[in-house]
């Protein structure tokens, strides 16, 4: 059961660099954290948190598959674990120039990012609505404003921003906020997986001329997930070192 007053965070993509930072910050703040990912990464993060005396558990789930998300919800609620915060970071990226985009890569990117976000909101928003309180924080990217060779990824992130606004309108009167964080380059994860030329391009269009530490971006999720952000909903927070301003595009 939830401790009185304690938040329960469900963090998809919790096994990645940014997800790990967010899980650590949430657990250090007294929340129980459900680390959601595929493979063994979720268990690794949860074990590290537990070893530090923090409250966490791991859950293996492919969020692009609705039946797996529904099973996750059933496992948690069946044990009396009721999420107050859902943060959606999960997603896989297959970028290519327009002429080289395949249906398979496009569908895979949309499924892991956009459909996964939709599935998690579909699964957990009703209980938040019934309770009269909840925080949902989704993940876009500065790339949603336009990116060379990123057609599939940009489409997925643009969809997430639109879904965030729409869900925020629907849930606002029920005490549930829905917002989005749009990072720029983050040290580790997808940024370091890009070719060196792509990394250089991103740095050149970032006024701060550096990438973010994962903890800097995790702090943005923590704010939007907090009770102090009670009058903020339907927003996309660009945490991108100024890249979204456009002067360096």
Image (spheres, rainbow, N blue to C red):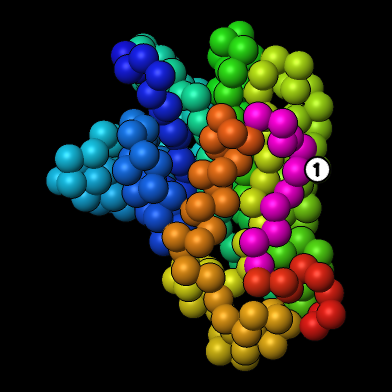
Res 30 seen here: yes
Does the image show residue 116? no
Q: Quadrant of residue 10?
A: top left
Q: Position of residue 99 (x, y in %)?
A: 81, 75
Question: Which residue carries the number 1 mark?
Answer: 162
Q: Does residue 171 sit above or below 27 in this rendering?
A: above
Is 47 or 173 nearer to us in this picture? 173
- Which residue corresponds to the image point at 55% horizontal and 76% vertical from the top-left? 211
- Per the image, is 238 magenta? yes
Q: Secondary structure at mark 1?
A: helix
**Which portion, as a residue range, is magenta?**
230-240
Q: Looking at the image, which residue is at 38% across and 54% down?
A: 20
User: How dense is the environment of label 1, judged by Cα within 10 Å: few (below 14), some, or many (20 and up)?
Assistant: some
Q: Quadrant of the N terminus?
A: top left
Image coords of residue 81 (percent x, y): 37, 18
Residue placed most toward the observer, 208 or 181: 208
Q: Nearer the viewer, residue 59 or 232?
A: 232
Residue 195 on image: x %, y %: 56, 85
Q: Does the magenta run of residues contain 33?
A: no
User: 26 left or right of 146?
Assistant: left
Quarter the C terminus occupies: bottom right
Q: Quadrant of residue 170?
A: top right
Residue at the far front: name it: 228
């Amino acid at each position: 059961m939830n401790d009185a007053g304690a938040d329960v965070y469900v963090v998809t993509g919790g096994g990645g660099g940014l997800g790990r930072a967010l899980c650590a910050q949430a657990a250090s703040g007294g929340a129980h954290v459900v680390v959601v990912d595929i493979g063994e990464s979720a268990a690794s993060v949860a074990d590290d948190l537990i070893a530090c005396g923090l409250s966490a558990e791991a859950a293996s789930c492919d969020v692009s598959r609705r039946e797996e998300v529904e099973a996750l919800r059933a496992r948690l609620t069946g044990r009396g674990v009721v999420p107050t915060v859902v943060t959606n970071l999960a997603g896989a990226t297959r970028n290519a120039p327009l002429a080289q985009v395949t249906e398979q890569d496009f569908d895979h990117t949309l499924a892991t990012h956009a459909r996964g976000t939709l599935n998690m909101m579909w699964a957990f928003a009703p209980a938040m609505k019934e309770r009269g309180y909840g925080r949902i924080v989704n993940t876009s990217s500065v790339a949603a404003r336009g990116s060379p060779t990123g057609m599939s990824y940009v489409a997925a992130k643009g969809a997430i921003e639109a879904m965030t606004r729409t869900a925020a309108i629907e849930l606002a009167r029920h005490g549930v906020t829905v917002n989005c964080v749009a990072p720029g380059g983050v040290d580790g994860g997808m940024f370091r997986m890009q070719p060196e030329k792509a990394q250089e391009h991103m740095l050149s269009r970032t006024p701060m001329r550096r990438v973010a530490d994962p903890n800097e971006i995790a702090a943005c999720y923590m704010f939007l997930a907090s009770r102090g952000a009670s009058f903020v909903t339907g927003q996309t927070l660009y945490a991108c070192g100024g890249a979204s301003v456009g002067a360096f595009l």
